[in-house]
Image (cartoon, rainbow, N blue to C red):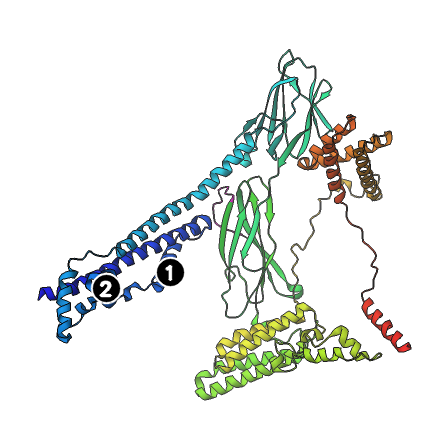
């Protein structure tokens, strides 16, 4: 009897092996894909490490959905081995059937293949699937390891590049008298950078850095000077009697250029770029700049701030001002709130603080104004914009005070929304003492009142009926038909329709400003939310929407308070000994300096210089007048190079070559012209007279029809 079931067991074991190996292979493939995606998300996109726990089951589920391997049954296996092994004579399925149900011929065939199947080798497809899955997993592990190295390699590359930029010498023209030199740059303490030496005169240093020049000449020099920005000349100190070793130190605060003067022989111009220390950048991601806390909302705000600085953050705090009262009785209270976090001179830090408005002493109707102030390790301070948080005052909303002041948008409508709130609160108080059906009927009735009020407010946006609320007219075909007809001259209505087209957008037929239109739309939205909950017998949930609609309506009328950061002006202390002395010699008439003519002269000179340089390209020589223009241009370019040496320093060197060389190089002329064009492009464009009137199209149409009538 064991022989009769051995073939069936062989097929069953193959199915189990097939499914198991395939599942392991799919899990390996899913693991490889999940590892690569997770490592990319974690190391490159800075996602949470828990990303893998989400990605792996999702990928595995997708693979199993595409290939549901567990659905393979023994009949599928029998068909597979029939195709694979011809010696089974397409009869493997007989091994799975009950022998009593087989015919005599089928029983003989079954006994025949029962002896054959046990001698067959297991197929290699399941093992191949297992091996392929493991290979993909190994590739995924290697690729994931490579992803982890990208930030490290990038950091090393940036450091090597920065180091190369600092140490790789720039090609410079060094005077022949100088045999050796070095420049030592000592950054200020706030940068937390070490000092460095370089073998080049072109300098890139931090603001406030100490620069020391050590120069050695091959011959004795009587005087060695440094000329900064063509205006400041400082002598170097000789360290020996032979006057071959020189030194000088200077603290730099701004960019510019300088050159060496060796006994009257001047060197090329060398760039001196100063990297400024920027203040702390403050980015508030939460909350919004204007936040109103309505009824039912927690009176707390979650503040999230991101601070970044180029060298380090020293401190940051919240400056908060609370406003209470209204009218002339407004009082302001200032408080300083700390983040309770150690900054540790970090360059980037995320801060978060939950501000409890109740703990600050705020009540409904009060407002909070706050901003973030941060200091870097250099003592620079920066502050964010002012953010506003207000708590809605339900008592003030329900009062009728101030309804007749300011912009009056149909005061009885305000009373209607107020009455809806009163009816809703009364219904909630009586809910426990009235039948359920009565409660539902009254809630539905209040919802109908809310709907009617919403429709009445929709008229302000030219929404004449319920179907038009939030929608547009669909009558463009009608307008298209009118365009086909001939316009009758003198028909004022047709002319106004053509240029106004007041039915394309219903809101454009109103006289309200866009901001008021937007707030009216918000009112309709809140009324719709309240109506929805009232009609579904949820008046408790409708109440916050009703209060918010009333608050928005009151905001449309007027603002009860305007915040001023400082109510007093700080002035210098008076000197008692100077008061009532009668000395007026220090008081002079105000003088207004006009630099317009000087600026016009500068631009005119630069434009003339462009033309003279263009003439020089054709072979013409500079005249005495041309030389004077170039000298004036050089003065202007010196000032530009002092402010932006990286942009204008090479052009200044080329301009000096053009002034001395008889055979100029075209590339020098091109470089100078490009720099002059950049200097001219900073000119502010002048206002021009408008040639056509705004309504010229209407005038032209009028005269066109007038001519037709005359004919």
Q: Nearer the viewer, residue 274 or 388?
A: 274
Say whether residue 711 is magenta. Answer: no
Q: Which residue is mark 1?
A: 58
Q: Element under label 2? A: helix
Disc 1 to disc 2: CB gap under 8 Å: no
Say which residue appears at 83% left-offset and 72% top-offset.
Answer: 701
Residue at image position (84%, 69%) is 700
SS at badge 1:
helix
Residue at mark 1 to residue at mark 2: CA–CA distance: 36 Å
Q: What range of the chain is rendered magenta?
A: 337-347
Q: Quadrant of residue 206?
A: top right
Main SS class of the magenta portion in the image: loop
Point out the tag, 1 or 2, that comes first from the N-terminus. Answer: 1
As displayed, is residue 80 above or below residue 431?
above
Q: Quadrant of the N terminus?
A: bottom left
Q: Nearer the viewer, mark 1 or mark 2?
A: 2
Instruction: Say which residue label 2 marks.
Output: 82
């Amino acid at each position: 009897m064991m022989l009769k079931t051995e073939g069936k067991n062989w097929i069953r074991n193959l199915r189990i092996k097939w499914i198991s190996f395939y599942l392991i292979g799919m899990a390996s493939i899913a693991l490889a894909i999940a590892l690569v995606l997770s490592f990319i998300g974690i190391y490159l996109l800075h996602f949470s490490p828990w990303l893998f726990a989400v990605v792996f089951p999702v990928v595995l589920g997708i693979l199993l959905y595409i290939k549901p391997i567990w659905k393979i049954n023994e009949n599928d296996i029998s068909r597979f081995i029939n195709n694979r092994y011809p010696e089974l004579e397409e009869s493997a399925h007989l091994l799975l059937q009950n022998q009593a149900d087989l015919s005599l011929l089928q029983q003989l065939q079954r006994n025949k293949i029962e002896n054959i199947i046990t001698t067959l080798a297991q197929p290699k497809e399941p093992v191949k699937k297992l091996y392929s899955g493991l290979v993909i997993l190994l590739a995924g592990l290697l690729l994931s390891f490579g992803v982890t190295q990208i930030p490290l390699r990038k950091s090393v590359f940036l450091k090597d590049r920065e180091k190369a930029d600092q140490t790789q010498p720039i090609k410079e023209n060094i005077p022949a008298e100088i045999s050796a030199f070095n420049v030592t740059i000592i950054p200020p303490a706030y940068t937390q950078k070490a000092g460095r030496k370089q073998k080049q005169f072109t300098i890139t240093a931090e603001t406030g850095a100490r620069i020391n020049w050590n120069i050695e000449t091959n011959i004795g020099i009587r005087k060695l000077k440094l000329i900064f920005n063509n205006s400041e000349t400082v002598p170097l100190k000789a360290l020996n009697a032979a006057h071959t070793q020189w030194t000088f130190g200077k603290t730099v605060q701004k960019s510019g250029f300088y050159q060496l003067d060796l006994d009257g022989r001047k060197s090329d111009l060398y760039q001196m770029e100063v990297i400024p220390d920027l203040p702390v950048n403050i980015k508030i991601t939460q909350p919004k700049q204007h936040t109103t806390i309505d009824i039912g909302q927690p009176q707390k705000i979650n503040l999230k701030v991101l601070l970044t600085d180029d060298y380090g953050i020293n401190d940051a705090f919240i400056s908060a001002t609370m406003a209470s009262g209204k009218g002339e009785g407004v009082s302001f209270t200032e408080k300083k709130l700390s983040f309770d976090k150690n900054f540790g001179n970090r360059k980037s830090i995320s801060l978060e603080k939950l501000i409890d408005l109740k703990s600050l002493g705020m009540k409904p109707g009060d407002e909070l104004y706050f901003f973030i102030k941060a200091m870097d390790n250099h003592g620079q301070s920066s502050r964010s914009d002012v953010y506003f948080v207000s708590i809605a005052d339900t008592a003030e909303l329900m009062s009728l005070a101030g309804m007749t002041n300011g912009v009056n948008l149909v005061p009885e409508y305000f009373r209607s929304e107020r009455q809806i709130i009163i009816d809703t609160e009364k219904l909630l108080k009586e809910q426990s003492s009235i039948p359920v059906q009565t409660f539902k009927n009254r809630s539905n009735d209040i919802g109908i009142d809310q709907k009617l009020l919403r429709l009445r407010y929709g008229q302000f946006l030219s929404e004449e009926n319920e179907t038009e609320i939030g929608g547009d007219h669909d009558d463009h075909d009608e307008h298209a038909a009118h365009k086909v007809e001939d316009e009758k001259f003198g028909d004022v209505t047709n002319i106004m329709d053509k240029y106004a087209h007041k039915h394309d957008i219903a809101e454009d037929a109103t006289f309200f400003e866009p901001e008021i239109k937007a707030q009216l739309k918000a009112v309709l939205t809140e009324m719709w939310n309240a109506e929805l909950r009232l009609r579904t017998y949820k008046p408790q949930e409708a109440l916050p929407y009703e209060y918010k609609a009333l608050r928005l309506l009151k905001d449309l009328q007027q603002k009860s308070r305007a915040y001023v950061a400082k109510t007093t002006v700080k002035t210098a202390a008076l000197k008692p000994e100077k008061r009532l002395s009668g000395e007026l010699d220090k008081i002079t008439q105000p003088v207004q300096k006009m630099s317009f003519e000087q600026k016009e002269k500068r631009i005119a000179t630069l434009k003339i210089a462009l033309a003279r340089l263009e003439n020089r390209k054709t072979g013409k020589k500079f005249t005495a007048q041309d030389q004077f223009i170039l000298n004036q241009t050089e003065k202007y370019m010196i000032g530009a190079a002092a402010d932006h040496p990286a942009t204008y320093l090479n052009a200044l060197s080329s301009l000096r070559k053009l002034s001395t060389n008889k055979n100029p190089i075209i590339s020098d002329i091109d470089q100078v012209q490009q720099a002059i064009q950049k200097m001219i492009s900073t000119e502010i464009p002048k206002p021009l007279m408008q040639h056509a009137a705004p309504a010229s199209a209407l005038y032209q149409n009028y005269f066109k029809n007038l001519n037709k009538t005359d004919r």
